[in-house]
Every structure is written in structure tokens, then in C-alpha cells.
Amino acid sequence: MSRSRAEDGAGTLSARVMDQIGTRIVSGAYKVGATLPPELMLCEEYGLSRTPLREAMKKLHAKRLIAMGPKSGTRVLPESCWNQLDPDLLRWRFASSPDEWLLGQLQELRIAFEPEACRLAAQNGSAAAHVTIREAFERLASASADPSRTIDPDVEFHASIARATQNIFLVSISAAISTALHLQFQLAAERETFPASELEQHRLICDAILARDGEAAARHMRALIGQSRASLVEALPRMRGKRRRPASTAAVT
Amino acid sequence: MSRSRAEDGAGTLSARVMDQIGTRIVSGAYKVGATLPPELMLCEEYGLSRTPLREAMKKLHAKRLIAMGPKSGTRVLPESCWNQLDPDLLRWRFASSPDEWLLGQLQELRIAFEPEACRLAAQNGSAAAHVTIREAFERLASASADPSRTIDPDVEFHASIARATQNIFLVSISAAISTALHLQFQLAAERETFPASELEQHRLICDAILARDGEAAARHMRALIGQSRASLVEALPRMRGKRRRPASTAAVT
DNA sequence: GACTCGCATTTGTATTATGTTTAGAACCTA
DNA sequence: TAGGTTCTAAACATAATACAAATGCGAGTC
């Protein structure tokens, strides 16, 4: 009975164990390609029975982090197989090493995704969806004095644009980006006030979408992401400067 | 012993049951928001014990199709929560109703990502990755006489571009797109020969990337996706013309 | 009528036993 | 010795059962 039953966050036992093992995989404690211990050994290590352990394994399997087979054991799949957009996986990544490389990867994803989302939101978005975007912007503007309170409206602003596209895939990707943005904004929340230039950029995006000018909205979104990155790289060195290289993303052809 | 043990495809029991229940959810047999039968009832219905059934449920949970709780039962989550890029989910969608709406959604996703992927592949791609792209193109060109044999090289062409970006998120999205493209190309494979204009467009993309001209590569990719869609909408009416509207993607604000 | 308490239902976890698959060793043959 | 075959056993896959925990819902009470 080494586990005090309340030390981890809430949720079921299988969810907590999935978090633990997932974190260990992402952090490299269980290396890619390696075979992790047999189930019975893991049961003993984490102090639980096979039922919840296997349910945790099946969830990791659904996220494509591991492969299981008789006799061969449970292997950690190469990172190129992982479902990198899974919110849980993103949480584990940010918890493990929110380094410059990860933020750069995220930046590239946003540059690909968000301008086009703006274009579609301007083109396809319903009037009600546009109102939601405007409301999120106004909540952001009214909270801009207190940076810690801008996180939620800022994330919601970007998410509401994605929803306005009426595209299920972009909405789904937006869920991943929202998770990552929330974690990223927490890193950058130490600044004293929300930068006025970024707020202005949000306003330009909002206005362009409501005017159904998709091209301008996309352009302003690109500018915002660029600004956001610039303000982040100067805030990042306050953290530990661990450096990670991909090393396996495009290795196996 | 109602189950003949070989009627379904290969794989574990939990995987097969996950496929069945997932298909039913996607097809609407289990409606969004509804509470599906208790576990013991499902066990009886599918003729198995709770252990593999729950493992299947946990995988659906990891894909965010369902939420489970004591007494409250197992509910089908709204589509906006689903991980729409999961390859399994895409398979179920195409099996259920590969209609014009779904292909339009996919088209929008591709327009958002593949041009930017081309730009990054031209900019960041290693020489080896570029060779891989060229090889995929050459396999495509040499098979262009027999459309059924162009499917795999064509999918591999797009996937190799994604890998060349060295961006884990784009590679992950590419896995979803590859699954969808494979299913989509099978629909369009009835044409007699691979269109010469599309092959030429592939060549332009390939050359632009190898010349590290990201802007041109992106432009040609946009053109290709447009052509691909045009050739598909005329091939689609041969299928049943079921019409589906989203109805819940952007409903809950 | 509102509030509390307890019951019944459903999921969550534990335990044990047995079946199935397959990597790897042992063995046999040419 | 090389090659293939068989065999074994380790590990996962499935089953069956029991109990614990949580919670929606209704009965009972104030």
C-alpha cells in the first residue's frame, strides 16, 4: 500500500497510470523501440492489478505510443507513429521538456493551420459564430491589464475561429492547439501586461473575419503568430535550456 | 459458440469489437449524446466477457468518442470532441458514408496543410528526404498506365513530403491524410488511366521542392489538390448520393 | 415542497485460471 | 556445418467471478 490514493490528480486508476507511463515514454525513461517490462512486473511496480493496467495500456495503444504482442512484449513505437496531436501526449511533452524545439514545431503547425482557418472562418462562418469570435476578443481586451487572465480568452479566441470554419478536421486540430497554447501561454504569462501590439493584431483579425475578408484575416494571423513567437523566445531563456533533436521523425523511410 | 472465430478480419478480439462499436457510433446507430447499453448487456450482445469489452471501450475513450462513469453509463460524446484525425475513425467514416460532404471536409484540410508542408519540405528537407520524394514520384510515373497501381505511390508521394518537413505534427496529420487518401483514391480508381495533367502537376511539385523553391511547390500543390477534387466530384455520383450535414460541429459554444 | 438518506444500478478494480501466440532454443537432417 | 523443423515456455489474450465505489433516483421525513 505504498500509494496514498490522493497524491496524484483525480480520475480513475487506469487514467492515472496511463499518465505515469505516458510521461515516462515521452520523457525517454522508456526509450523508443525498447521493450518495457512484462505486465505482471508493471502491476507490481505501480501497485495495481492487471485489469486497470491493461486498460491503461489499451489507451496508450489507441494513441499509437505502444504495440503489444504475445511473447514479444510491449514495445514503444517510433515517434513517427505517435498521434502527436493527442492532448494528453501534448501535456506530457510540455511537462517533460517545453524547450525551444517543441515551440518551434508548434509554431510551424500554427502557421500552416491558423491562417487557413481564418480564411475559412471568414468565408463559411455563420453570423452567430462570428459573434462568438468577437465576444472572445472583447473578453481578451477587457482582461489585457492582467496577463494571467488573458490566457483563457486568448485560447478561446483561436478556438472559436476554428469552430467557425465548420470543418471537423480543423476543429479537431484546434483542440490540440488549444491544449498546447494553454500550456505555452502559461510559460509566457510572466510578462507584466499583455502586449498592445498583439492585442491590436487580434483586433485586426477579428475585424477582417467579420468583414468576411479572408485574405486579410489570414495575413494578420500570420503576423500575430510571428509576434507571439518573438515575444516567447525572449521569455523562454528563463527556463532550463534543454535541447532536443528529433532524431527519429524522418529516420525510417 | 455463435462466433466462428474467423468471420471478421484478423486482430485481437478487443480490436474487432472496437471496430464494430466504433462503426455503429460513426454511422449513427448509437446516436450522439445517447447512453449506450450497460457493459453486461453489450457483453451478451457481442458474445464476449467484460475484460476485452472494456479494453475496446478504453480505446474508444482514448479516441474521445465516449465518456464513461459509474451509474451514469457510457455516453457518446459530441462529434466536436472526437479525434477526427484518428485513422480508425477515418476508416469508419469512409465505410459508413463516403459522401461529398466528407470529401469536401478533407479537401479543406489538405488545402490548409499540404501547400505549407511543401514549403517546409523545400526549406528544411534533407537531401535524403528529397531523394525519397523523387523516388516516390518516379514509382508513380512508371505505374501511371495502371490506375490501380498508382494508389500506393501517390499516397507515399504525399507522405514523403510530410516527412521531409521534419515537423512531428505535420507528419502525424499526414498519417491521417494518407489513410483518407488511400480510401479516396480507391473510390476514384475506376478511371482508365491516371490523368496526365495530374502526373505533370506531381512532377512540378517534385521539381520545385528539390530546387528548394517552397513558394512554387506550395502553389503547384494547391493546383493539384484542386484538380484532384475536380476529377473526384465527377467520379463520385456513381456512388450512393447520401447527404450529411454536420449539425453538431459548431453547435455547442 | 424541499431536503436528506438509503437503495439499486453501473462502472471500477481485484483475483485467478486458462487459452493462444510466437520468439527463441533445441534438435534433427542433409 | 548449414538449414530447416519442432518444441517449449514466456508473454499477452480472454474468461469468469467477486467485491468496492460512486451516483442517479426515489422513498421517506420534516
Image: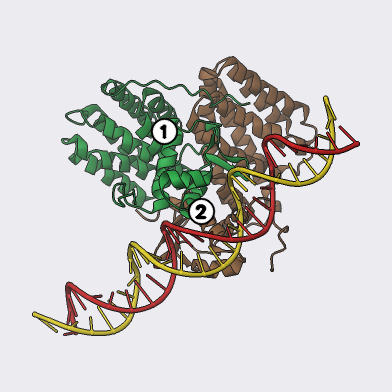
Chain colours: A brown, B green, C yellow, D red
Tell whether A180 sits left or right of B151: right
- Residue B162 in which image quadrant: top left
Residue B73, given in percent of the width and then of the height, sits at: 58, 41
Can you say whether C4 is above or below A10 in the image? above
Tell whether B111 sits left or right of B155: right
Can you say whether C21 is above or below A142 in the image? below
Q: Which mark is residue B115?
A: 1
User: Which residue is under mark 2?
Assistant: A60
- Residue B182 in which image quadrant: top left
Can you say whether B94 is above or below D6 in the image? above
Visible residue check, residue B235: yes
Label 2: chain?
A
Can you say whether B16 is above or below B98 in the image? below
Considering depth in this image, is B182 or B110 the residue closer to the camera?
B182
**Label 2 crowd bin: few (<14), some (14–19), many (20+), radius 10 Å:** many
Q: Which mark is residue B134?
A: none
Which residue type does callout 1 highlight?
Answer: Pro
Q: Residue at x 77, y 26 (%)?
A: A142
- Residue D9 in which image quadrant: bottom left
Q: CA distance from mark 1 to mark 2?
A: 31 Å
Q: Are marks 1 and 2 on the same chain?
A: no
| Nearer to us: label 1 or label 2 | 2
Residue B121, given in percent of the width and then of the height, sits at: 41, 42
Q: Are marks 1 and 2 in contact (CB under 8 Å)?
A: no
Quarter of the image for the C terminus of chain B: give it: top right
Label 1: chain?
B
Residue A189, given in percent of the width and then of the height, sits at: 73, 42
Visible residue check, residue A208: no
Q: Residue at x 58, y 24 (%)?
A: B251
Residue C5, given in percent of the width and then of the height, sits at: 81, 45
Helix or strand or loop: what does disc 1 sit on?
helix
Considering depth in this image, is A165 or A246 the residue closer to the camera?
A165
